[in-house]
Image: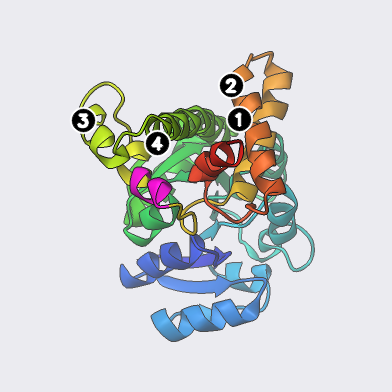
Amino acid sequence: MARIGFLGLGVMGFPMAGHLQAAGHDVTVYNRTAAKAELWVAQHGGALAQTPAMAAKGADFVMACVGNDDDLRGVCLGDAGAFGGMAAGTVFVDHTTVSAQVTRDLHGVAAQAGISFVDAPISGGQAGAENGALSVMCGGEAEAYARAAPVIDVYAKICKRLGESGAGQLTKMCNQIAIAGLVQGLAESLHFAQKAGLDGAAVVEVISQGAAGSWQMANRYETMLADQFDHGFAVDWMRKDLGIVLDAANETGASLPVTALVDQFYKDVQRMGGGRWDTSSLIKRLSALD
């Protein structure tokens, strides 16, 4: 079993760290809000650290699941950062969705200290984290990935290396591009069914068995029809991710017209006060246009 430092105990990190502890690993947690770390220790055991560096000291692996580029830099760098507490030869695994550029920058800083850095963003939402069924897309050196994969597998349904540093983050961008279009299409389909006087649930029962079927349809249609948006991945976070996607598209020359349009639709949802609603709330925007 490994000694693991886990940084960030949000809706994803909290259960992920719990799976590691339950699997027999020796987990020390850090969270910016100490009360959340105290709650985790009360529920799962393990240890609590006051800084990322303290959580990383003596660890074989350090896993991070924080908010954005600045949050990731904050837990990695500086006197209290994780890199300062990690010994040469250890592996840092970043589960945060961030830009490929900050990933490559931190990969370079880590390499200078003899630390391996694997970018490993996740998909599957809160339910996936709680059930240990996340999709994990990874970038970094093959040797570092091979060492980290058995640890990641504790909470993963699939874990795959896609290439060198940044490849995991670029793959997560592909994931968010696909989701944006799917959710908007589902929202329009259900909205149309309602306006046409059809039973939305009956419509989904039929069309989900054909080419229109998707994870989003299977897992979100009921709450969308019930006007319930208090679960899943928040609009604020989706807009953060789509901002990263669109910046990368400008750099690579990729054309993403649907993604850019759906990003603006999510901006409308924020203006409606729905920043913390989950991403399926696009249907609420359509209803508001009636």
> Which residue in the structure is indicated by mark 2?
258
Give the x, y percent position of residue 123.
45, 44
Give the x, y percent position of residue 275.
64, 52
What label sits on residue 194 in the rendered view?
A: 4
> Which residue in the structure is indicated by mark 1?
262
Give yes or no for contact between labels 1 and 4 (Cβ–Cβ under 8 Å).
no
Looking at the image, which is closer to me, 155 or 118? 155
**Gap between marks 4 and 2 measured at Cα:** 24 Å
Give the x, y percent position of residue 97.
59, 44
**Which mark is first along the chain, 3 or 1?**
3
What label sits on residue 206 in the rendered view?
A: 3
How many callouts does the rendering have?
Answer: 4
The stretch of residues the image draws in magenta is 221-226
Q: Quadrant of residue 238?
A: top right
Residue situated furthest front in the rendering: 197
**Gap between marks 1 and 3 measured at Cα:** 26 Å
Q: Amino acid at mark 1?
A: Val
In terms of secondary structure, where does tag 3 sit?
helix
Q: Residue at x 37, y 61 (%)?
A: 130
Give yes or no for contact between labels 3 and 2 (Cβ–Cβ under 8 Å).
no
Q: Residue at x 44, y 51 (%)?
A: 125
